[in-house]
Amino acid sequence: MSLSSWLADLGLTRFTSIHHWDAHPLVGLSSLCFGFPAASYAAVAWAMWDTKTKVDSYQLALYALLAFLFVGVVLMCYLADYCFIKRGHRSAYGRFDIRLASLTFVVCVFDFALRGPIFETFLLISATVAAFLLVFMV
């Protein structure tokens, strides 16, 4: 069962975006916002690779993976929310977009949990989930 159908069954929200959502230039441009974390993670990974000091190889691999994932999110968000959106229809790109964004979120949280205290990680996850649910309840 998907999250959207689970939330709809609980009566928390009704998803009607496919009935009125259409391609809009600002939606396409908003996908570029994920380029900032992609560039940041790529820059840090490059700096860690280029430095002569000893760095943790798992952290370098995670930064490179996150840069790659965020580039994928940019492309998939653009395709799903701008190129292949049609009023009243759901494209397969939307499903791939949600899955890639979810995977990217999990890897980001995992990376943060490796570097930060568990309490801050819990606060980060709680704030993100609360904001996600708040958007759908309004």
Image (cartoon, rainbow, N blue to C red):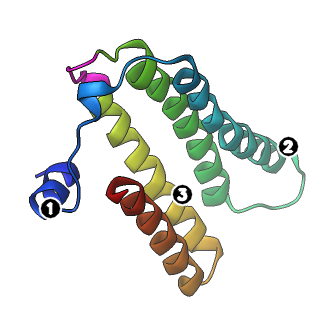
Instruction: List x then y, in percent, for residue 93.
Output: 31, 24
- Pick whichever of labels 2 and 1 is earlier in the sequence: 1
Quadrant in the rendering for residue 59: bottom right
Question: Is residue 89 highlighted in magenta?
Answer: yes
Q: Is residue 125 left or right of residue 49?
A: left
Amino acid at pointer 3 = Cys
Q: Which region is colored magenta?
A: 87-93
Label 1 Cα crowd, 10 Å radius (few <14 / some 14-19 / many 20+): few
Residue drawn at 55 percent across, 86 percent down = 119
Query: Which disc number belongs to residue 11?
Result: 1
- Label 1: state its secondary structure: loop
Rounded to the nearest angstrom, the CA distance separating label 2 from label 3 is 23 Å
Q: Nearer the viewer, mark 2 or mark 3?
A: 3
What residue type is disc 1 on? Gly
Q: Earlier in the sequence, mark 2 or mark 3?
A: 2
Residue 134 is situated, as x and y percent measured from the top left of the image, at 40, 62
Front residue of this view, candidates 135 and 37? 135
58 left or right of 106 in image? right
Name the amino acid type tagged 2.
Asp
Q: Select label 2 or label 1 by which is in front.
A: 1
Q: Which residue is mark 3?
A: 108
Disc 3: CA contacts within 10 A as few (<14), some (14-19) or many (>=20) = some
Mark 3 vs mark 1, foreground winner is 1
Asked if residue 131 is among those painted magenta in the image, a careful observer would answer no
- Badge 2 density bin: few <14, some 14–19, many ≥20, Cα 10 Å: few
Looking at the rendered structure, which numbered label has been put on residue 110? none
Residue 80: % across, % down? 38, 24
Q: Mark 3 or 1 closer to N-term?
A: 1
110 left or right, relative to 90 = right
Name above or below for residue 11 compared with residue 90.
Answer: below
Find disc 2 in the rendering and name its residue: 50
11 above or below 60?
below
